[in-house]
Image (tube, rainbow, N blue to C red):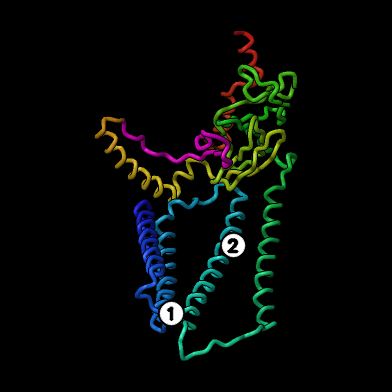
């Protein structure tokens, strides 16, 4: 990519010098043809360049799709993500079809109707039927996409805490970290407010609320596969955004209010690691890290550890200097492993009791 950008910069620099030389020649007014009108030879050349450019455009596009496919997201790890990805694919396919047709026609017409001194341009006022067709078709297609998108969004955002046995988790955002709070056996999160933040109570849980006593606060997000998870999100300071790309989930975390999102994980962390896409991607990353480690060892530094895939909760709003490092590991596991992990965690009551004893 650096080489590609360098070539572009050099090309632009050359064009700048060329244009400046033309300006100098024009300012001197000597040895300059009386007319700057393009002749047939110029028009033919420009027409051929237009055809060559559209061919180059699609070759480059195909190369980028193949070369950078490792940057695409793998299969979705959430139930609603299947419908989300389908909507995205429909949109991309439609855009690519329209782009293919319009770009080819644009460059072909530029070549076919290039200037020719023996040919006059035809003045074509309007055609109501043609204008109606190229207006109504985009309207119908876009209306269909919008309606489909609205139904998809409604299904995704239809959050019912009384349906099934969902896991209730609070995601607490602050510069520059995440904390998770799980509802206890009562399946209800206790009240919280930033005014209660003190000592070990880092997210402001209301110690006077009996519903808060069995809540569990953790720095790592564990989720059971196949079970709906309802996230309630709070921010301590500025606007953040809870972004979980592998689950096709994102929701703003706004100071002074609680926002919600829900999804059902369908692939455990280990299952995602074993997928063909992820195995290939991890191998590619580790090959790069291996080469980098050789350079580090040669300098006397420690080599890089091998990369292993994990889900992560990220912040997708630029929230300050360390925004890039605001993340929390997500572990999707079986119901049994999730319950075993949850039992090992201390409840809020145990945490504050231990603080009082000290």
Image location of residue 86, percent across then percent down? 59, 58
Image location of residue 31, percent across then percent down? 34, 75
On screen, residue 74 versus residue 137, left or right, reads left
> Residue at the location (56% across, 23% down)?
344
Q: In the displayed structure, would residue 284 be above or below residue 55? A: above
Residue in the foreground of this view, choosing between 184 and 122: 122
On screen, residue 112 versus residue 4, left or right, reads right
- In the picture as drawn, the residue positioned furthest to the bottom comes out as 118
Disc with the residue nearer the chain's start (2 vs 1): 1
Residue in the foreground of this view, choosing between 249 and 121: 121
Quarter of the view holding residue 320:
top right
Residue in the foreground of this view, choosing between 20 and 132: 20
> Residue at the location (67% across, 58% down)?
149
Disc 2 to disc 1, how far (Cα)? 48 Å
Mark 1 packing: few (<14 Cα in 10 Å), some, or many (20+)? few
Residue range in magenta is 302-325
Image location of residue 245, percent across then percent down? 55, 46
Residue 91 — which label? 2
Q: Which residue is mark 1?
A: 35
Image location of residue 136, percent across then percent down? 69, 74
Looking at the rendered image, the quarter that the C terminus falls into is: top right
């Amino acid at each position: 990519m650096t080489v590609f950008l360098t070539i572009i910069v050099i090309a632009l620099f050359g064009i700048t010098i060329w244009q400046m030389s033309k300006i100098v020649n024009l300012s001197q007014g000597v040895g300059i043809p009386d007319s700057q009108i393009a002749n047939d030879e110029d028009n033919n050349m420009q027409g051929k360049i237009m055809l060559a450019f559209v061919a180059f455009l699609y070759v480059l596009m195909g190369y980028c799709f193949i070369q950078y496919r490792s940057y695409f997201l793998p299969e979705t790890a959430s139930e609603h993500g299947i419908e989300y990805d389908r909507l995205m694919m429909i949109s991309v396919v439609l855009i690519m079809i329209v782009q293919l047709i319009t770009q080819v026609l644009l460059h072909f017409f530029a070549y076919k109707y290039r200037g020719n001194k023996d040919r006059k341009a035809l003045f074509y006022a309007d055609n109501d039927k043609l204008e109606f067709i190229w207006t109504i078709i985009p309207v119908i297609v876009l209306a269909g996409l919008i309606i489909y998108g609205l139904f998809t969004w409604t299904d995704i955002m239809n959050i019912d805490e009384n349906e099934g046995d969902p896991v209730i988790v609070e995601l607490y955002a602050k510069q520059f970290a995440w904390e998770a709070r799980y509802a206890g056996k009562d399946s209800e999160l206790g009240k919280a407010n930033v005014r209660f933040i003190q000592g070990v109570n880092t997210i402001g849980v209301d110690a006077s609320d009996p519903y808060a006593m069995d809540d569990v606060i953790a720095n790592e997000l564990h989720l059971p596969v196949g079970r709906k998870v309802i996230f309630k999100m709070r921010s301590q300071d500025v606007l953040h955004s809870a972004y979980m790309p592998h689950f096709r989930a994102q929701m703003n975390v706004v100071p002074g209010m609680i926002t919600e999102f829900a999804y059902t994980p369908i692939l455990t962390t280990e299952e995602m690691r074993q997928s063909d896409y992820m195995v290939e991607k991890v191998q590619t990353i580790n090959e790069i890290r291996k080469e980098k480690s050789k350079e580090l060892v040669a300098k006397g530094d420690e080599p890089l550890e091998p990369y292993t895939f994990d889900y992560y909760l990220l912040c997708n709003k630029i929230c300050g200097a360390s925004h890039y490092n605001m993340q929390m590991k997500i572990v999707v596991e079986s119901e049994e492993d999730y319950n075993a992990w949850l039992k090992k965690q201390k409840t809020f009551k145990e945490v504050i009791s231990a603080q009082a004893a000290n």
